[in-house]
Image (cartoon, rainbow, N blue to C red):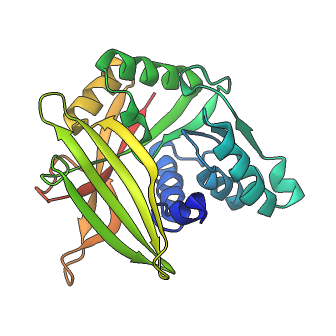
Amino acid sequence: MDKHYYYQNSVQCVEAEIDFVESTYQTLKGHPAKKLREDFCGTAQTACEWISRDAANQAWGVDLDPLVLQWGNENNLNQLTVQQRQQIQLLNEDVMSASIAELDVVLAMNFSYFIFIERDLMIRYFKSVKESLQSNGVFFLDAFGGYEAAKELVEERECDGFTYIWEQATFNPINSQMQCYIHFVTDEGVRLDKAFDYYWRIWTLPEITEMLLTAGFKTAEVYWEGTDEKTGEGDGIYTSSKLGTADAGWVCYVVAEK
């Protein structure tokens, strides 16, 4: 059982993510972004999607775990053309001190930055990202919340050949810190428990945007998902918003301009 394969095929949708980054940067700046860094990149699937879009695009993936970078190199980068391999580089570094600068875009997706549970540490990370961006650069993050985010629960979702299980095992309302796990079960009944283990803090959107501004970003805007009038579900279209809906669970983007 390959947990990274299951993760990529249940959690990530890199095509939609990069669609949003491309279109939002173009709208904000009036020209396309070319240089992207994916922080907490894991298998670097998003960075690979970025360089596959345009021969002029460049990408760097940064992660502390050498094993997940090795998996990404063997399973994602090895699927690229020779030319595309020259457009991407994986770095086994701390995102706080990543060596790549003068970037158009930095990404911190899949709520990865929630591992910084102290305000001062989060602001220090945001400051380091700001310094890594060129003068016209943009920082893209995602966030989740809703009244079910602060409770203990287990959710299952059927995928192609396996079941994805998200567990919020504990939540402490005093400090908003929680323990979460991802489990997988194949259609044949083989289980992979605690394939992924997360201990993080649920940061609210006001906290995130305020910390970005404190770190020196010029703007910090929330992009909220629209609603399909026929189904009542999310329509996959995210726009800059001042008003959200009190859903049980939501995911949004935060976009900060240097």
Residue at 61%, 62% (x, y): give it: 2
Query: Can you give x and y, in whole percent of width and height, for residue 228 in the image?
Result: 24, 76
Seen from this angle, which residue lies furthest front?
190
- Residue 188 visible to the viewer: yes
Residue at 42%, 45% (x, y): give it: 197
Query: Can you give x and y, in whole percent of width and height, for residue 123 in the image?
Result: 37, 19
Mark count: 0
- Front residue of 85/35: it is 85
- Front residue of 29/9: it is 9
Q: Is residue 67 left or right of residue 17?
A: right
Vertical side of 72 occupied by 257: above or below? above
Query: Can you give x and y, in whole percent of width and height, for residue 154 in the image?
Result: 25, 61
Vertical side of 8 occupied by 205: above or below? above
Q: Is residue 83 left or right of residue 157?
A: right
Q: Which of the 4 image quadrants contains residue 232?
A: bottom left
Q: Is residue 111 left or right of residue 50?
A: left
The quadrant the N terminus occupies is: bottom right
- Front residue of 196/175: it is 196
Query: Can you give x and y, in whole percent of width and height, for residue 62 in the image?
Result: 63, 35
Vertical side of 217 occupied by 192: above or below? below
Residue at 59%, 53% (x, y): give it: 46
Residue at 47%, 82% (x, y): give it: 187
Q: Is residue 61 left or right of residue 151?
A: right
- Residue 34 visible to the viewer: no
Q: Which of the 4 image quadrants contains residue 245?
A: bottom left
